Image: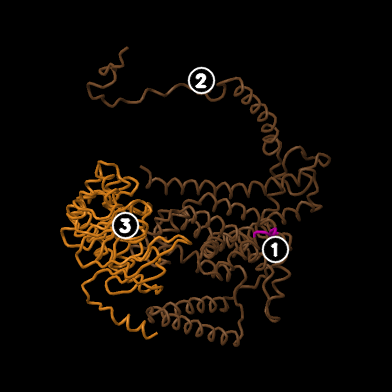
């Protein structure tokens, strides 16, 4: 018990780290998906995570807003440690935005309603104010004219930009991207990446699972390579692409960079 | 041998302009040929169907309308041996008995109260079902609170005559409820003020309701044993429909809950009620419910089958709703969670609106089944429409060969109008809800 108290006391809420993962393990049944993950993300840092499919990249970032539960180790987001306490989970989710591979917009609500829903119900913001904020972010992702349409009437790229705007409406401190361009037609990848680059340039803390290596080179502070549930390599983009250390990384890069 | 491809033949040199579709409009003859006589098999089928229609429709029309007897005061009009016609339906019988079919044995001088109930019901249903009606939130308050209270007072006469002990018991229970909510709020670290407002609101609403039921409006008491006919059929169906949807949703959510006790309780309730015939449920509600309750408490004999049918329909509804919940992609839950919505917010705002829309056909199917199943309450001695017809057709005053057929034809017509109405309405809602989401 005393050890626990000391450890808890050691967390400094004003610490520079936006996200800390300490000795995190996770199992799906018998399958060990995350093995001893240690990662510390500074405020304003942009991190790109890549790796072969099934390596645990998505699982790792989904643990950060507790869409997945870790079974061992500690995850501290913006000074709040994630435990079974629902209140803390809600607290963390308010500050962490997430963009999914398949957008996950709400098809029965208009674009504007998609964006104002969480501010109105979670932040208890007046409807008018929420709509102003939503329109602001929809302008930023360059689709204000679609505000009264339904998600099904938009192209994939437009839907993903709406999903980004929807997250931004909650003014998150951290944004998680889970393969945001993987389900898009090639022609639409750029419009989404441009939005993300704009966001990165404004100093948003970002964790991005993606295979868009151009994006990694352009904005990432660090690139992480994962394999078999472990962080195998972590480096600046320059070093990562020029000078990969690990055999597995070399093989991976040779396959996706042709 | 050359394998070169003649490229210019395959690649468009110019942009092809968009053209209007070829003209598909053709005359009725072409339509008939295409749809009714497109091949030998289709032709045979068409002829068989036409023959069946020829055999069944004209005699039915002849019985129901052409040969029918429309007026008369007793059996003489519908008996050949007494100077009437007996080949057609005896609508005179229905006209003579219509007030019995509508009100049952309800005290004759008080039947205006039932008429007001029908009018209030029509207003409530219209208000809620007309999707563009003004202030549907007020409509919901009217339909789910004011209308039931007024109906209770109107139909029974109110003046429930609660004892002083009852009121003391109510006050104690109310105080306990408020205290429990406040306690929960403290434990869950939620706002204490909200908890007190909610608790006070619930106790207040129930208190006002009970006070209204207790008040003496000078209406004569009409015991439920006298109610009958369409009044009872509509009452049982309305209570069943209104109760089964929310309770079914709760059961479905309970069955998918992660909490083992909630899940087990839901599964046991659903499987038990669904695995037993409605007649058994009704008989059990009628004879066993009083056994479970303390000795001095009695449940009205109309109330028992009401509870039985409502529970029965809820179990079916729960499975329909569960089907819709299971059809929801996981991404919708994750999208809602990642925005920080709480479980109730996620369910009410995101998941249920979509899940319920998927299962509208199933929900209406259950409603229609329930509406027709109300005729089974006759088994425990309630005089619903079918039972009143049963009782009237053996009336010696109206002893004539076509009386039974006419009575059942009337019942069929009544049930068909309501069920068909529900079916058409749900189709309209489906179309309306689908329009916004399609490309």
**Residue that label 1 marks:** B282
Q: Are marks 2 and 3 on the same chain?
A: no
Give the extent of the magenta segment: B274-278
Marks 1 & 2 on one chain: yes
Q: Is residue B120 visible?
A: no
A223 or B372, which is in the foreground? Answer: A223
Estimate how packed mark 1 is, as few (under 14), some (14 to 19) or many (20 or more) residues with alpha carbons within 10 Å.
many
- Element on which disc 2 rests: helix
Foreground residue among B222 and B140: B140
Residue under the image location 42 percent in, 49 percent down: B433
Specify the principal SS of the magenta part: loop
What color was chain B assigned in the picture?
Answer: brown
Does residue B46 appear left or right of residue B134 in this picture? right
Residue B376, picture quadrant: bottom right
Checking the image for residue A226, the label placed there is: 3
For disc 2, the marked residue is: B29
**Which secondary structure lies at badge 1?**
helix
Q: Residue furthest left?
A: A201
Whether the magenta-drawn stretch holds residue B191 is answered as no
Q: Quadrant of the N terminus of chain B?
A: top left
- Could you say where residue B353 lies in the image, as x and y percent from the top left? 43, 57
- Disc 3 secondary structure class: strand
């Amino acid at each position: 018990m005393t050890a626990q108290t000391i450890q808890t006391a050691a967390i400094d809420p004003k610490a520079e780290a936006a996200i800390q993962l300490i000795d995190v393990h996770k199992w799906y049944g018998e399958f060990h998906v995350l093995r001893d993950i240690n990662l510390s993300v500074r405020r304003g840092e942009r991190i790109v995570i890549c790796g072969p499919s099934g390596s645990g990249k998505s699982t790792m970032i989904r643990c950060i807003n507790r869409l997945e539960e870790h079974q061992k180790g500690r995850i501290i987001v913006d000074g709040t440690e994630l435990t079974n306490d629902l209140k803390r989970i809600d607290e963390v989710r308010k500050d962490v935005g997430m963009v999914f591979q398949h957008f996950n917009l709400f098809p029965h609500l208009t674009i504007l309603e998609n964006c104002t829903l969480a501010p109105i119900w979670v932040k208890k913001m007046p409807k008018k104010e929420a709509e102003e904020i939503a329109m602001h972010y929809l302008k930023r992702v360059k689709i204000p004219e679609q505000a009264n349409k339904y998600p099904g009437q938009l192209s994939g790229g437009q839907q993903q930009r709406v999903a980004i705007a929807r997250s931004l409406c909650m003014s998150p401190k951290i944004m998680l991207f889970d393969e945001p361009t993987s389900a898009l037609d090639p022609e639409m990848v750029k419009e989404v990446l441009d939005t993300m680059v704009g966001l990165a340039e404004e100093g948003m803390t970002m964790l991005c699972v993606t295979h868009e290596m151009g994006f990694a080179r352009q904005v990432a502070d660090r690139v992480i390579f994962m394999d078999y549930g472990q962080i195998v390599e972590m480096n600046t983009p320059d070093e990562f692409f020029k000078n990969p250390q690990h055999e597995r990384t070399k093989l991976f890069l040779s396959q996706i960079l042709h | 041998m050359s394998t070169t491809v003649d490229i210019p033949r395959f690649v468009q040199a110019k942009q092809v302009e968009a053209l209007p579709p070829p003209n598909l409009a053709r005359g009725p003859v072409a339509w008939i040929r295409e749809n009714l006589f497109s091949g030998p098999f289709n032709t045979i089928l068409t002829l068989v169907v036409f023959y069946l229609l020829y055999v069944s429709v004209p005699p039915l029309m002849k019985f129901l309308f052409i040969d029918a007897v429309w007026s008369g005061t007793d059996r003489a009009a519908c008996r050949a041996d007494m100077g009437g016609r007996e080949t057609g339906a005896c609508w005179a019988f229905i006209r003579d008995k219509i007030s019995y079919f509508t009100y049952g044995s309800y005290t004759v001088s008080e039947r205006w109260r039932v008429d007001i109930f029908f009018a209030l019901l029509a207003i409530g249903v219209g208000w809620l079902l007309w999707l563009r009606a003004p202030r549907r939130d007020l409509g919901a308050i009217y339909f789910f609170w004011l209308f039931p209270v007024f109906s209770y007072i109107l139909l029974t006469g109110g003046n429930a005559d609660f004892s002083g002990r009852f009121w003391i018991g109510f006050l104690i229970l109310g105080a306990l409820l408020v205290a429990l909510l406040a306690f929960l709020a403290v434990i869950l670290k939620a706002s204490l003020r909200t908890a007190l407002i909610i608790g006070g609101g619930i106790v207040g609403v129930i208190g006002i309701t009970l006070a209204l039921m207790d008040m003496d409006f000078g209406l004569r008491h009409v015991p439920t044993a006298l109610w009958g006919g369409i009044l009872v059929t509509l009452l049982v169906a309305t209570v069943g429909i209104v109760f089964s949807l929310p309770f079914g949703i709760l059961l479905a959510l309970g069955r998918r809950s992660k909490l083992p006790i909630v899940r087990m309780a839901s599964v046991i309730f659903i499987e038990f009620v669904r695995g037993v015939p409605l007649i058994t449920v009704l008989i059990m509600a009628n004879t066993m419910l009083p056994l479970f309750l303390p000795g001095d408490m009695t449940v009205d004999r109309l109330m028992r089958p009401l509870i039985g049918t409502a529970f029965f329909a809820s179990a079916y509804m729960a499975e329909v709703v569960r089907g819709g919940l299971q059809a929801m992609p996981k991404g919708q839950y994750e999208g809602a969670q990642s925005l920080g919505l709480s479980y109730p917010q996620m369910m009410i705002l995101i998941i249920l609106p979509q899940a319920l829309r998927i299962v509208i056909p199933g929900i209406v199917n259950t409603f229609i089944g329930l509406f027709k199943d109300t005729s089974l309450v006759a088994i425990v001695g309630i005089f619903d429409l079918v039972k009143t017809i049963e009782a009237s057709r053996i009336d010696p005053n109206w002893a004539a060969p076509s009386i039974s057929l006419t009575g059942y034809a009337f019942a069929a017509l009544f049930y068909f109008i309501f069920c068909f109405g529900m079916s058409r309405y749900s189709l309209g809602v489906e179309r309306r809800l689908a329009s916004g989401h399609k490309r």
